[in-house]
Image: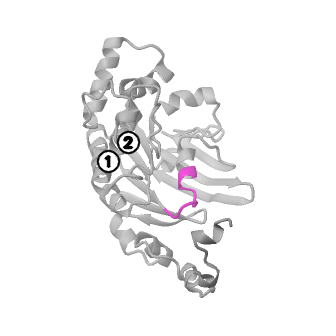
Amino acid sequence: MTHNNGEHLKETDIGGVIVLKNIRKQFGEKVVLDGISLNIEKGKTTVVIGPSGCGKTVLIKHLIVLLRPDEGEVYFDGQRIDHLSEDKLRGIRTRYGFLFQGGALFDSMDVSENILFPIRHHMGKIDPGKAHRIVQNKLAMVGLEGYQGYPPVSLSGGQKKRVALARAIALNPRVVLYDEPTTGLDPIRSDVINELILKLQRELNVTSIVVTHDMTSAYKIADRIIMLHNGHIIADGSTDHIRSHPNQIVQQFIHGQADEADLAVLRMNSGSRDIQYTPEDFHRD
């Protein structure tokens, strides 16, 4: 594979199915991504961790060019894609599945119609018999066979996530992006989602990129964990590497420990007890 005005990577540069080169993204005065370079290895699960607001979701949106970088380049399968038109990106995006944080099911559609939505959006009409088989197969993959006619409002939080995942794999993607897949779920339902992520990697050989705050989930599913902080990757490696990482910021995050500066503010004696009110203080005479 040769360079063509910066549109393709050299063979020696290809380190993954998705490659980011020196990505910079700024919103107003805030630099969210500051020179991020990253190779996403085919068939592996890469987990992205970091504090709220550090740019995790912004990062994965660049992988599918839902956001375009201010500087830098994004490659998929060796082809540069960040500068392509929306029309040309349409075909490339069929190779991705995206599980949104809240599931993002359409309440006006039943389970079957939700799963078929990306197929109809990208491919147009589909034979009813084939559509039935696709929905049945995808629901079986996530353990919800028989739920075709259910409206989303009748599903539990965990079931909604599983239907959303069935929709994410409707087009047999090569890459699945997960944005906080276990948020809002209890530990048991969270583990079901973890098992599904592992199952899809194993049975479909998909490449998975998972954004999460859930370290239990991260340790279970990850082949590789990267941590973002202040627009930079400050840690990158296996679960064992992250567990023993020498960076104090990494250790505070993975153990859920508040920063001492934040704790110092909370411990300050502000005399607030002297200005506390009770409901009776607001009653009118």
Disc nearest the viewer among 1 and 2 = 2
Residue 208 or residue 213, whichever sits in front: 213
Which amino acid does the dot numbered 1 rest on?
Ile
- The residue that appears at 54% across and 51% down in the rendered structure is 57
The x and y percentages for residue 143 are: 25, 37
48 relative to 7 in the view: left or right: left
The x and y percentages for residue 267 are: 55, 85
Q: Is residue 57 magenta?
A: yes
Q: Is residue 35 magenta?
A: no
Indicate the secondary structure of the residue bearing disc 2.
helix
Q: Main secondary structure of the magenta part?
A: loop
- Residue tagged by mark 2? 161
Question: In the displayed structure, would residue 214 be above or below residue 141?
Answer: below
Q: Please identify the residue farthest to the front as the structure is shown.
A: 285
State whether residue 178 appears in this view: yes
110 relative to 269 in the view: left or right: left
Residue 102 or residue 57, whichever sits in front: 102
Q: Which residues are magenta?
A: 50-58
- The residue that appears at 61% across and 47% down in the rendered structure is 73
Question: In the displayed structure, would residue 185 be above or below residue 123?
Answer: below
User: Cα distance, mark 1 to mark 2?
Assistant: 8 Å
Question: In what quadrant of the picture does the C terminus appear?
Answer: bottom right
Q: How many numbered marks are there?
A: 2
Dot 1 and dot 2 residues touching (CB under 8 Å): yes
When asked about the image quadrant of residue 43, the answer is top left
- Residue tagged by mark 1? 193
Determine crowd level at label 2: few under 14, some 14-19, many 20+ residues with C-alpha closer than 10 A.
many
